[in-house]
Image (tube, rainbow, N blue to C red):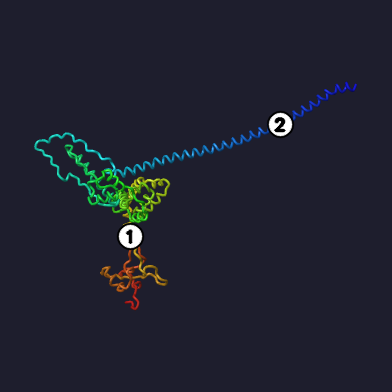
Amino acid sequence: MDDVQNAVGAPTRHTYEQMVHLHHQQQLHSQQQMEMNNRLMAELEEQRRRQEILVQQLHVQKHQTEAHEHGLHQAAAASVKQGEQLEEMRRRTSARWHALSAAPVLAAAAPPTTPAAAGVQIVYGLQEMPKAPSFNGNTKVQMRKFMDQYEAYAREVNIANHQRPGGAQIQRAPLSACIDPLAVERIAFCEIGKPSHELTEDDWRVFFLGAKDCDPVDMSKLDGAMAKLKMDTAVQSAESRVSKLVSDFEAVLVRLSMEGFAEAKPKLTVDYLVAAVQPPAVRARVKELMKLNENRGLKKDARDFKRWLSDYMRRYGEFEPMMAAVVAATPKLDKLSAAAKIPKAGKGPKVVAVVNVDKVPMMAAVVAATPKLDKLSAAAKIPKAGKGPKVVAVVNVDKVPKSNVPVPSGRKPSR
């Protein structure tokens, strides 16, 4: 019987143990699954946080990229403007010495000449031939002066060629023919570094164009020269004053070998021109106007400032004659003498009584009645316009009672 029960209970016990074991495994599996889910959730949260950080970084990079792009646009615009300024400076410099910087142009073939009319003879005088300059210097200033002279000579040759009929052209003298023979060997050996017989026209052109490079600016010399620069108020036209001021400013730069300073340093150029404005009242007003926000851009371009100053001086010139007339009509107050300043305590203003006798002129009566006027100060003799109060009583004898006639001290009244 026990064996039967054991045989029947063994599978049941075995099945229960399996179920407990299975339940335990399921719990472990669900716990592992939950831990895995928690770990995945944490990883997802971390990935979401990292994604937000990356998005923020992308936004920052986007702003930086936009700022860099804006800066690149500004730099490109500034580069274009600077290139235009350099091109303008190069144009001005090349236009000044175009005869040396331009490539030599061969003379065109002369067109067939038409025979002159009968009885007409064309004679070319020696005055039509421009004279070439000669160079015997060694400094940049002398080289610049020679290039200016050669440029003027080249223009004269071109004008003469245009005016000559028949196509007969004047050949321009080369640079090598304009050098003093005593200076050729020195320049060839010391400056160019070639034998004189090997020098070409290009070598001479490069040698002279090297003087275009300005030396470092000596601000002390420039400040000293600009301190003497003043607007000429004797010029009648107000606009012409500005033009003459700019011309004098350029002359100072040329004398100091500082060409191109106005383009390179527009702010200093404007400051120098403002300091030279005359009269002082106008200069003070110009300084106040330059501080306005709308006029700040004028300090970046000397040409715009020159146009603005010309317009302002033109408007000032319309009222300048009226201002001068008002100043001339205003009397200058003389200094009061010590006797006419302030009366001391106990001393009042002097009263002079002039007695006018019948049939005696007024001026004669005044002179006769005031014998001590020469002892008075000049300010107390004759009152001027605007001076202190002085009382002069003119009394007619025939109209004033005897009791009212003033009697000098020390005299008895007449009966």
Q: CA distance from mark 2 to mark 1?
A: 113 Å
**Mark 2 surroundings within 10 Å by alpha-carbon count, few (fewer than 14), some (14 through 19), many (20 or more):** few
Can I make out residue 321 in this image?
no
**Mark 1 lies on residue:** 331
110 vs 189, left or right, is left
Local secondary structure at mark 2: helix
Q: Position of residue 19 (x, y in %)?
A: 79, 26
Q: Position of residue 241 (x, y in %)?
A: 31, 50
Q: Nearer the viewer, residue 32 or 245?
A: 32
Q: Nearer the viewer, residue 336 or 302?
A: 302
**Mark 1 surroundings within 10 Å by alpha-carbon count, few (fewer than 14), some (14 through 19), many (20 or more):** few
Q: Nearer the viewer, residue 73 or 208?
A: 208
Q: Quadrant of the N terminus?
A: top right
Q: Quadrant of residue 342?
A: bottom left
What type is the residue that disc 2 sits on? Gln
Query: Residue 379 — which label?
Result: none
346 vs 201, left or right, is right
Can I make out residue 77 in this image?
yes
Query: Residue 32 — which label?
Result: 2
19 vs 301, left or right, is right
What type is the residue that disc 1 sits on? Pro
Local secondary structure at mark 1: loop
